[in-house]
């Protein structure tokens, strides 16, 4: 088959797969009717409750995927926004918003993201009642959710039924790759970002055709339209159409964008239904991980920190900072760091560091100044004392600098970590000595089994591309 015929055959296969998946993802007419009825009645009941309380509510609206039909049915939540005057004090905003939510929702539960909101149920749907301010300029929000009504208006005015279908298809594709969701735990594409890129490129296939040629960082608009103050590690740059000072893709990590770029090329060459079927594979047990370490000839040390009472979006950036700080310190301490990972259990934070060998060399070279400068005498005085732990030296190196060789007090990676942890900056709420508890360091074989440990081991010792994952035992 010639190249042209092959290209047409692959495109036809992608068309067929995407039609079948789109049909499966499309909500039923009954579901759409139930969502529409719940949206309308929620707003009406909130207005009634606000009148009864004489609440200063300005506006209630349902926004997000439930309002536009871009939801995935098995991940359908209704986002109800309760907007108040901009001059309302924040404590009153919280009080009024949560009170109105409790008046309408069953099984209400206060939750926290960037600010408090209420999670409850209404007519069988999970509903998040989120208080915010009714601002007139989305470029000057007073709370994290104040742009949402403007996002709703922007997308609703532009999305056709065909675009809505492609958004659902893209969300499912990104979800299968593990790159869907802007929360700090995932660092992926937000639903709003998915909808914007579908609007820009017209379809999932259009996004993937563009993405296969992207380089990191990628900008989707001309450079002169970049939002200001972009961080150096930015992955994707797309100014929010309702607030050009904001990068819509600020939560997206470089790893997740790279995953999409690679997946785009693979899918366009080898389309199939499996690209739209999220799967959960068994993670590594401690025993399986120890067997792999024996085969690899490496060693894993595990730092355990008490988990602070923080919401995920606050906790996970600190956990990743702790991972970087610990791995960098191990490398500075003359161990060969092969890799690192982090994970969170209900009661603890785990940082795993894989090193080439559990012991560093006994001998350490202490660098000295070059001959001929004033500090030479101080260096010689220090290292020629009778009690100086010198194995050899002082002596002159070939480059003219002085050196001595000393015996290391700690050689095991766990002992070194225990010694240095108190002075490391691991994150505001994670550094040793902070509540709720001290840190501990153990080799993997002495670390308690848990779901978090298994996730960390999988990230550390079972790396693979998402579309190449095979069940445990078949890798």
Image: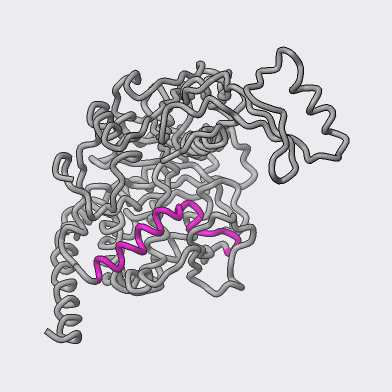
The residue nearer to you, when weighing 368 against 461, is 368
Query: In the shown orientation, is residue 321 left or right of residue 201?
Result: right
The residue nearer to you, when weighing 145 against 420, is 420
**Majority secondary structure in the magenta region:** helix
Q: How is the image coloured?
A: one colour
Tell me if residue 102 comes above or below residue 135 in the rendering: above
Give the image location of residue 74, x and y in percent: 22, 47
Q: Which residue is drawn at 13% across and 71% down?
A: 16
Residue 116 appears anywhere in the view? no
Query: In the shown orientation, is residue 420 left or right of residue 175?
Result: right
Magenta stretch in the rendered image: 244-268
The residue nearer to you, when weighing 39 against 238, is 238
Q: In which quarter of the image is the N terminus?
A: bottom left
Tell me if residue 172 comes above or below residue 290 in the rendering: below
* Residue 141 colored in magenta in the image: no
Give the image location of residue 262, x and y in percent: 33, 63
């Amino acid at each position: 088959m010639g190249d042209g015929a092959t290209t047409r055959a692959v495109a036809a296969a992608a068309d067929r797969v995407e039609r079948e998946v789109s049909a499966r993802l499309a909500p039923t007419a009954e579901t759409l009717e139930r969502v529409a009825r719940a949206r309308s009645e929620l707003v009406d009941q909130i207005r009634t409750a606000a009148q009864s309380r004489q609440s200063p509510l300005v506006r209630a609206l349902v926004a997000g995927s439930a309002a536009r039909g871009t939801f995935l049915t098995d991940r359908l939540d209704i986002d109800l926004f309760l907007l108040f005057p901009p001059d309302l004090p924040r404590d009153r905003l919280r009080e009024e918003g949560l009170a109105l939510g409790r008046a309408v929702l069953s099984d209400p539960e206060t939750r926290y993201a960037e600010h408090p909101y209420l999670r409850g149920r209404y007519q069988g749907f999970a509903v998040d009642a989120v208080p915010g301010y009714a601002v007139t300029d989305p470029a000057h929000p007073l709370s994290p959710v104040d742009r949402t009504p403007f996002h709703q208006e922007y997308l609703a005015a532009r999305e056709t039924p065909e675009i809505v279908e492609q958004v659902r298809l893209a969300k499912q594709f990104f979800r299968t790759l593990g790159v869907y969701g802007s929360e700090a735990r995932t660092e992926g594409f937000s639903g709003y970002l998915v909808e914007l890129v579908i609007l820009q490129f017209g379809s999932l296939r259009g996004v993937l055709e563009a993405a296969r040629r992207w380089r990191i960082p990628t900008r989707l608009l001309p450079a002169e339209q970049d939002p200001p103050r972009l961080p150096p590690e930015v992955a994707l740059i797309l100014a929010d159409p309702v607030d050009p000072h904001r990068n819509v893709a600020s939560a997206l990590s470089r790893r997740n964008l790279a995953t999409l770029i690679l997946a785009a090329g693979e899918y366009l060459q080898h389309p199939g239904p499996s690209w739209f079927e999220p799967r959960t594979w068994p993670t590594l047990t401690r025993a399986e991980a120890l067997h792999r370490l024996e085969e690899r000839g490496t060693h894993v040390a595990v730092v355990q920190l008490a988990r602070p009472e923080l919401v995920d979006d606050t906790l996970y950036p600190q956990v990743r900072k702790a991972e970087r700080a610990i791995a960098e310190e191990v490398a500075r301490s003359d161990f060969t760091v092969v890799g690192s990972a982090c994970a969170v259990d209900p009661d603890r934070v785990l940082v795993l560091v894989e090193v080439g060998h559990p012991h560093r060399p006994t001998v350490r070279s202490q660098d000295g100044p070059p001959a001929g400068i004033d500090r030479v005498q101080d260096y010689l005085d220090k290292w020629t004392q009778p009690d100086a732990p010198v194995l050899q030296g002082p002596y002159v190196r070939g480059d003219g600098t002085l050196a001595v060789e000393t015996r290391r007090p700690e050689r095991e990676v766990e002992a070194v970590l225990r010694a240095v942890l108190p002075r490391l900056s691991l994150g505001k709420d994670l550094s040793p000595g902070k509540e709720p508890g001290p840190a501990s360091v153990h080799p993997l074989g002495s670390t308690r089994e848990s779901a978090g440990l298994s996730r960390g081991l999988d990230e550390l010792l079972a790396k693979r591309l998402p579309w190449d994952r095979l069940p445990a035992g078949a890798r």
